Amino acid sequence: MSGPELFSRPRRFGRGAALTLVFASVLAAGVATGSWSADGRKSEQQPAGSATGVGSGARTGRDEVADAAAEAMADGKSPTQAAEEAVSRSGDRWGAVYSQGEYKEFEHELDGQYTGVGLWARRTADGRIEVAKVGSGSPAAHAGVRRGDRLDTVDGRPVTGRPVTEVVSLLRGEHAGTAVRLGLARGTRAWTETLHRANLATESVTVSHLPGGTVLIKVAAFTKGSGQRVRSAVRGAPRRDGVILDLRGNSGGLVTEAVTAASAFLDGGLVATYDVRGRQRALHAQRGGDTSRPVVALVDSGTMSAAELLTGALQDRGRAVVVGSKTFGKGSVQMPSRLPDGSVAELTVGHYRTPAGRAVDGRGITPDLEAEEGARQRAETVLSGLGDPS
């Protein structure tokens, strides 16, 4: 399992709300459902009905959270804390409340910006945490941290056996300039390194060309513009080259960007369906995608949310052979609501399904060929067996 610091931080972890990762961040869910505009402003359009399919006059969890926040505000108490307590009582696995600062941070993340030390992490088969990548020019790079180094502790806390999402949460910080102490090992050498977090930018899509005529497209997260970059990479590749679409460690992002990425391989048609407060809706690919080029999608347990939506669409529609390990299993729709103090509450109002009607939430996507160690090599072998496009 691997994951970049971007889009991998658990939200409000350990503060009553469940581990919340980005399937749609505050903006992503709103953009997909039409309740929030791309620039973060509230839209006049609102979905009708409720998450349970009852009439719009029925009270919902969002109403209760909003009421709790308003009452707290009137009593001179913290609306954010009251909303967090209401979300916790609701039993919503993915419900969460974000301060104004956190909300602003998510906006930056959608633009491919984040606060961290520039490390990508992955968990090995024995549960150890290993550095999968070091960002160029990052604090980690300046400190001499290398790919393959073992990460044993973060601020004195052992990380072996922990999910990568938790480890990344420890690496991330609220502000640039704050310090984080890493316990590292390389071979027989063990040492401690103190790094200072910085405001960093990441390239969410990287393209490389492998021997034998294979294009490797790695999508780290579905930030703004990533879908079009995938389409451009496919269009610009030699016609007979196959594609490995590497979605390992992709914790999601903007649903609209995942749909655009799907459009690189589909000539229109259904990408996913979803329900919002009892109303069924559909997401469709754009016309003009490459439907003949062989494709293998690489996934793992760090493939989440919008990345699972894309994987399910390509698998159901016969456009990709999926290789790797079972994906995370987050396929729910959250709707944002602005609270009186400017914070934002987000509660689940529906769920996504693949074109074949498969539910993703809590189940994940099962690969056509399971492989963990050497997954990319297996993907290359499978791709070579798919033959040249006709």
Image (spheres, rainbow, N blue to C red):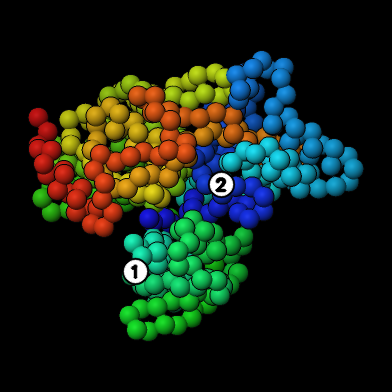
Q: Is residue 94 above or below residue 256?
A: below
Q: Residues within 10 Å of mark 2 (few under 14, many from 20)?
A: some
How many angstroms separate mark 2 from mark 1 (CA)? 27 Å
Q: Mark 1 falls on what kind of element?
A: loop
Horizontal side of 274 relative to 315 (left or right) equals right
Residue 145: % across, % down: 40, 74
Q: Residue at x 47, y 71 (%)?
A: 139
Residue 163 is at least partly visible in this image: yes
Q: Where is mark 2, residue-wise? A: 20
Residue 225 is at least partly visible in this image: no
Q: Residues within 10 Å of mark 1 (few under 14, many from 20)?
A: some
Amino acid of disc 2? Thr
Quarter holding the N terminus is bottom left
Q: Residue at x 25, y 39 (%)?
A: 368
Instruction: Work out whether residue 139 or residue 26 is closer to the camera in this orientation and state it.
Output: 26
Residue 252: % across, % down: 45, 43
Q: Which mark is residue 374?
A: none
Instruction: Work out whether residue 283 or residue 232 is closer to the camera in this orientation and state it.
Output: 283
Q: Where is mark 1, residue-wise? A: 147
- Dot 2 or dot 1: first in sequence order is 2
Q: Mark 2 falls on what kind of element?
A: loop
Horizontal side of 320 relative to 115 (left or right) equals left
Quarter holding the C terminus is top left
View extreme (right): residue: 75
| Image quadrant where residue 313 sits | top left
Horizontal side of 317 relative to 154 (left or right) equals left
Residue 147: % across, % down: 34, 69
Horizontal side of 47 relative to 127 (left or right) equals right
Q: Residue at x 55, y 28 (%)?
A: 350
Residue 331: % across, % down: 47, 35
